[in-house]
Image (cartoon, helix red, strand yellow):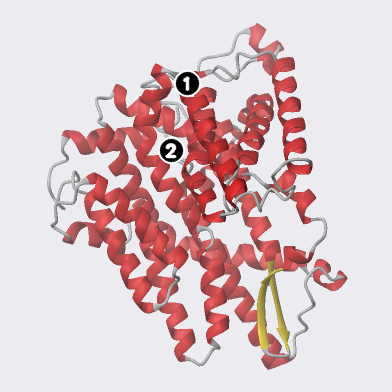
Amino acid sequence: MTLFAERPTEQVGPRAPRSPQARRSPARRSPQPAQPGRSRRDAGIDAARAACLVVVFVLHAMMVGVTVGPDGPVLENAMEQWDGFAAATWIVQVMPLFFVIGGYAGWTAWQSMRARGGTAAEFVRARVERLVRPAIALVVAVGAALGLLALAGVPAEVVATAGFRIGQPLWFLAVYLACTALVPMMVRAHERRPIATLAGLATVVVSVDALRVATGIEAIGFANLLFVWLLVQQLGFVLAQGHVDRMPRRARLLVAGAALALLFAITHGGPYTPDLFQNLNPPTAALVVLGVVQLMLFSLVRARLRRWAERPRPAALVARFGEWGMTLYLWHLPAFVALAAALLVAHQAFGLELPDPVSPEWWASRPAWLVGAAVVTAMLVRVFARYERGSGTGPRAVGVRLRVRVPLGVAVVAGIVGVGVALVIGFAPLPALLSVALLAVALAGARRAVPAVGAQPTRNSAIVSASERGSHR
């Protein structure tokens, strides 16, 4: 599953002229289903991914509340104090659409790689390597920074809170790794028995929810960290096959409306909360229903979005988001924490006022906060984006120097557990070292098929490179 774009593809030769009929009625053209071996990106998919990243960035920025209480600095989720947040989540909860897009991208990337003779192992290695490199950079840098803050005398509670906030997005990376590793297997299941695969996953999701509600044991629900997102990923497979685009617009609107009505019923009169962000922890069937709504609505605007994204300026902007997507996702919360720390220093040194979260003064200060957050995030992205593509020396060197034969299954598990250690335990020195060690094992296993520096490219490495250029065509 490739939520974040691979390298842009160069277009070979001039674009064929459009027919007079096509020029007269551009709105009637539907996106074509992805075909194995095709080398053209879908700009609508790329633009939707970029839009989701912007929504996540703005939402997380608005959650940051930094004040000074009687006992010292307070770093909290400001949205917990806003009465309108639950209603707002029906618009800003875009994670299901993220995974729908990821399913589309994973389907097309794997089909493209398979058409070139690539194997499932090569596909998974390429994706694991892409994800693990920036994760290593994050754990090393954040662990070191928090350690220095602790040595400088910053209260342990503040350091722990900062580490918790920074680590929150890592749940996505762990799930992303698992879903990525399962793409070839899930594609095979979908090709053979698509309805049975969707129905089977849906049954498991609902069963997990029912067991959690019946027993009152919340931990049971975390099994759906895998099953909910695998099911939503399968919806992306359906989109990639072209089935959704072949539905009449009226039918898609009816499905979206019916799914929205069902979502309202199960969150206002059923077992799920109307706050769709609370449905993330643990994931519930409500997110699957929301995914159906978002799939249908996205399919209705996809053609127009694609035409806009193919214009030169939007295309350049969308390409940046695709190139640095994972880095932006991993580093935006560290940027917010760093900016919050700067505000606390300014408050201490210059008496800068820090308004209480969701107060009128706080809302009035949000535009300036968003601009500052964007600037700091952009600075961090420029520093660390090289690790996402392997042009940095740190994480890449780890994969080159570890001459250990790591089985691919071990590499995937090591990557998931390594991310989980930082997510659950935090960035204290020992957990950070353990997390980095596990991620290094994952990187070593992912890079096993890559030739040593100075060696001639092998057939496998050429296939991987071609597949990355041909992602979600």
For the image, the number of numbered tags is 2
- The label on residue 324 is none
274 on left or right of 202: right
Q: Given the current orientation, which residue lies at the most extreme right position?
A: 360
Can residue 334 be seen at all in this image of the molecule?
no
Q: Position of residue 62 (x, y in %)?
A: 71, 62
- The label on residue 196 is 1
Q: Position of residue 71 (x, y in %)?
A: 68, 90
In 3D space, how far apart are the residues under numbered discs 2 and 1 (Cα atoms)? 20 Å
Q: Residues within 10 Å of mark 1 (few under 14, many from 20)?
A: few
Vertical comparison of 76 with 209: above or below? below
Residue with the mark numbered 2: 1
Residue lying at 64% horizontally and 60% vertically, measured from the top left: 60
Q: Position of residue 413 (x, y in %)?
A: 31, 51
| Quadrant occupied by the N terminus | top left
Query: Looking at the image, is mark 2 or mark 1 earlier in the sequence?
Result: 2
Vertical comparison of 276 with 106: above or below? below
Q: Which amino acid type is marked by label 2?
A: Met
